[in-house]
Image (cartoon, rainbow, N blue to C red):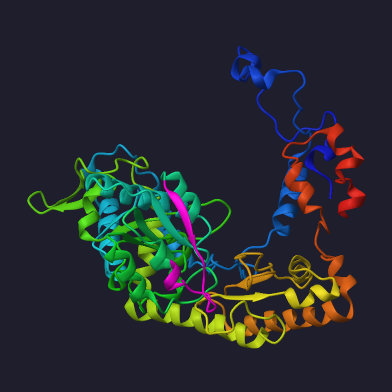
């Protein structure tokens, strides 16, 4: 398939404007100077139908949750009810100006107020902030308020403990908050080593960031002992809710002693996840940490009978994002929670766990599990048994594309000696048995191919618009803009012959 620039024909245009439209206007005066440089690439000269067909064809090459199973681990790529999208697109929501008088946006404020109460009930916390714009942004918010808490107590704590099975962004968020990151190794069961935790936890440590179930998809049965170890030294427990899809209605982090809870509304609560957004990484805290939350919060003034913005106070970490956070995500979340109710929030988690363990049970004889035990809503298998046939996990994933499936997460999590050549599969509650059986049968078929015909995997994928690419080269020498000369350099290996359009 040619690029849009390669379809350009001099003089061909896809629009028409009245001849007198630009009579008194010079184009040079409308465009920034940078856009008028002579060495800039001209826009492609194509007709309207050429443009429509080109980008429609490209869109059909995309794979999304509307096409089939999206088995990415630690992502919860579930089907998202269209009613949620419709509600979030109501004119009075999407056109509400951030500076609108609060009298004009009472419905919007009520949504955030009610959502806060529901999330507190679901997690066992006392107050949420809706401001964080993403999961990592929520992590940073939680880290900053923990930092402010200990500064207020005049305690010099500069370390944060993070298990090697934690969610991937935890170490970066802790480092951005100004703390030293101390890794806690997993035990032979894939959970936190309690002896290692006890030795590392001291009065200079802020606390522990824990994902439960962890990033290998395993519940940590030592959670109550973990809570004692951290709190006995005056530390705080941070709950990364990236995997809450395995916990809704089953356990509440607050009941297990967590002080700070981070939720990805764009994972667990139905907003489409991926493609860069939108996200919402809301943060909930116990009552003693409420004074440190970002300002403002939403409250109800019974005297005025209206919802208001409430200043948190002088201990607040301040504003971490302007206005109301990613409001459309909050609308979708509230819709999803209200449409399911307590009983079916529990059913969503139960079905997620059943689906993951079903895949684990069916595939464990073909792809050795990182840890052979019951999992949460995702299972971590490995492709290391096929290394003796010259096959890597990457090639298994690429071969899966030939059968019409998006590959699962690979090479994550990765820590020795267990989690090597990992294949992480997360089938959310929205997937039925029939689609899971088809996926399982294909994965088994690929395992046989790896033994009997490894070259088939080494050259995969075969039926996609672009065949095998040099992934390492693409990272090192990324081509983000079209350039005639660059396209013709054979050394970049991006010629049409090499990528098999």
Q: Is residue 420 left or right of residue 216?
A: right
Q: Residue furthest top?
A: 24
> In the rendered image of this protein, does residue 197 appear above or below residue 181?
below
The location of residue 92, given as percent across then percent down, is: 35, 49
Asked if one can make out residue 90 in the rendered structure from this viewpoint, the answer is no
Q: Residue at x 29, y 40 (%)?
A: 318
Indicate yes or no whether the magenta region holds residue 188: yes
Image quadrant where residue 29 sits: top right
The location of residue 101, given as percent across then percent down, is: 24, 39
Front-most of residues 415 and 168: 415
Q: Residue at x 78, y 67 (%)?
A: 395
Front-most of residues 225 and 129: 225
Label total for image: 0
The location of residue 358, given as percent across then percent down, is: 58, 86
What segment is highlighted magenta in the picture? Answer: 179-196
Front-most of residues 41 and 440: 440
Q: Residue furthest front?
A: 199
Asked if one can make out residue 231 in the rendered structure from this viewpoint, the answer is yes
Q: Residue furthest left?
A: 303
Q: Is residue 111 left or right of residue 58?
A: left
Q: Is residue 490 left or right of residue 185?
A: right
Q: Residue at x 90, y 37 (%)?
A: 488
Front-most of residues 118 and 128: 128
The location of residue 169, given as percent across then percent down, is: 51, 55
Indicate yes or no whether the magenta region holds residue 223: no
Quadrant, the C terminus? bottom right
Image quadrant where residue 432 sits: bottom right
């Amino acid at each position: 398939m040619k690029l849009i620039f390669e379809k350009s024909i001099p003089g061909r245009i896809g629009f028409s404007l009245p001849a007198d439209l630009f009579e008194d206007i010079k184009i040079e005066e409308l465009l920034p100077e940078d856009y008028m440089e002579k060495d800039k690439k001209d826009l492609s000269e194509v007709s309207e139908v050429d443009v429509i067909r080109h980008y429609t064809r490209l869109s059909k090459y995309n794979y999304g949750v509307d096409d089939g199973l999206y088995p990415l681990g630690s992502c919860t790529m579930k089907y998202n009810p269209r009613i949620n999208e419709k509600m979030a697109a109501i004119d009075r929501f999407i056109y509400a100006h951030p500076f609108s008088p609060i009298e004009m946006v009472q419905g919007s404020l009520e949504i955030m107020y009610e959502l806060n109460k529901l999330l507190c009930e679901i997690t066992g916390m006392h107050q949420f902030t809706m401001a964080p714009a993403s999961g990592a942004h929520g992590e940073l918010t939680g880290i900053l308020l923990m930092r402010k808490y200990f500064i207020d107590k005049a305690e010099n704590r500069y370390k944060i403990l993070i298990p090697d099975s934690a969610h991937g962004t935890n170490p970066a968020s802790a480092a951005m908050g100004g703390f030293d990151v101390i890794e806690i190794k997993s035990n032979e069961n894939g959970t936190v080593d309690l002896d290692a935790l006890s030795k590392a936890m001291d009065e200079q440590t802020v606390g522990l960031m824990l994902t439960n179930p962890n990033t290998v998809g395993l519940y940590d049965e030592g959670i109550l002992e973990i809570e004692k170890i951290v709190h006995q030294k005056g530390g705080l427990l941070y709950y990364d809710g990236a995997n809450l899809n395995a916990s809704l209605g089953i356990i509440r982090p607050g009941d297990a002693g967590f002080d700070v809870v981070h939720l990805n509304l764009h994972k667990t609560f139905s907003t489409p996840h991926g493609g860069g957004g939108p996200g919402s990484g809301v943060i909930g805290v116990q009552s003693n940490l409420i004074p440190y939350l970002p300002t403002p919060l939403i409250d109800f003034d019974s005297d005025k009978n209206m919802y208001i913005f409430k200043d948190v106070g002088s201990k607040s970490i301040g504003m971490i994002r302007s206005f109301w956070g990613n409001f459309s995500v909050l609308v979708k979340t509230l819709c999803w929670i209200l449409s399911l109710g307590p009983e079916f929030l529990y059913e969503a988690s139960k079905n997620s766990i059943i689906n993951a363990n079903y895949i684990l049970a069916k595939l464990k004889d073909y792809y050795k599990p990182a840890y052979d035990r019951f999992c949460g809503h995702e299972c971590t298998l490995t492709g290391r048994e096929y290394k003796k046939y010259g096959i890597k996990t990457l090639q298994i994933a690429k071969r899966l594309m030939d059968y019409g499936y998006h590959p699962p997460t690979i090479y994550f999590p990765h820590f020795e000696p267990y989690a090597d050549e990992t294949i992480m599969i997360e089938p959310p509650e929205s997937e039925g048995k029939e689609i899971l059986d088809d996926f399982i049968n294909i994965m088994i078929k690929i395992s046989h191919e790896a033994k009997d015909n490894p070259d088939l995997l080494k050259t995969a994928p075969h039926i996609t618009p672009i065949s095998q690419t040099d992934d390492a080269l693409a990272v090192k020498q990324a081509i983000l803009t079209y350039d005639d000369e660059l396209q013709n350099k054979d050394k970049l290996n991006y010629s049409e012959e090499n990528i098999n359009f």
